[in-house]
Image (cartoon, grey):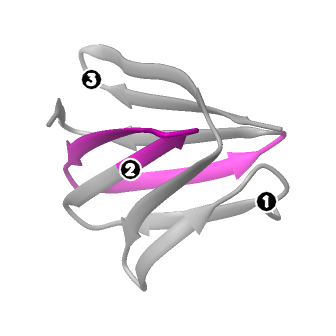
Amino acid sequence: MTLRVVVSTPDGDAVDCEADHVVVVSEEGEMAIYPRHVPIVALLKPGVARFVLGETTQRWALSEGVVEFADGTATIVVTTAKAL
């Protein structure tokens, strides 16, 4: 089972992919989101997010923003996102 990951910036969607899990840097510290995670909304600090699918890990430098997880989708809204 996977979850959908969407990273949105003012310039449009930077990422729209599937992942086994997502790791982001929230105001409370590093947070992992899996497909059956409870719905959540959290503030993000600038940092590196990881989107893991099998043996592949995408790393993205994200600015401050918000992450919402609901209905199998992690929606991340930030000012800037850059693939590493």
Q: Nearer the viewer, mark 1 or mark 3?
A: 1
User: What residue do we see at 58% from left, 38% from top?
Assistant: 54
Question: Residue 60 shows which numbered tag?
Answer: none
User: Quadrant location of residue 47?
Assistant: bottom left
Categorize mark 1 by other alpha carbons within 10 Å: few (<14), some (14-19), many (20+): few
* Quadrant in which the C terminus is drawn: top left
Q: Which residue is mark 3?
A: 10
In the rendered structure, which amino acid carries the disc numbered 3? Pro
Mark 3 touches mark 2? (CB < 8 Å): no
Question: Residue 50 shows which numbered tag?
Answer: 2
How far separated are the C-alphas under marks 1 and 3? Answer: 24 Å
Q: Secondary structure at mark 3?
A: loop
In the rendered structure, which amino acid carries the disc numbered 2? Arg
Where does the image place residue 7, in percent across and percent down from the top left? 42, 31
How far separated are the C-alphas under marks 3 and 2? Answer: 21 Å
**Magenta-colored span:** 50-71
Above-or-below relation of 12 to 3: above
Q: Secondary structure at mark 1?
A: loop
How far separated are the C-alphas under marks 2 and 1? Answer: 19 Å
* Quadrant in which the N terminus is drawn: top right
Q: Of callouts 3 and 2, which one flags the residue occurring earlier in the amino acid sequence?
A: 3
Where does the image place residue 65, in percent across and percent down from the top left? 34, 53
User: What residue do we see at 79% from left, 39% from top?
Assistant: 72
Q: Which residue is mark 1?
A: 39
In the rendered structure, which amino acid carries the disc numbered 1? Pro
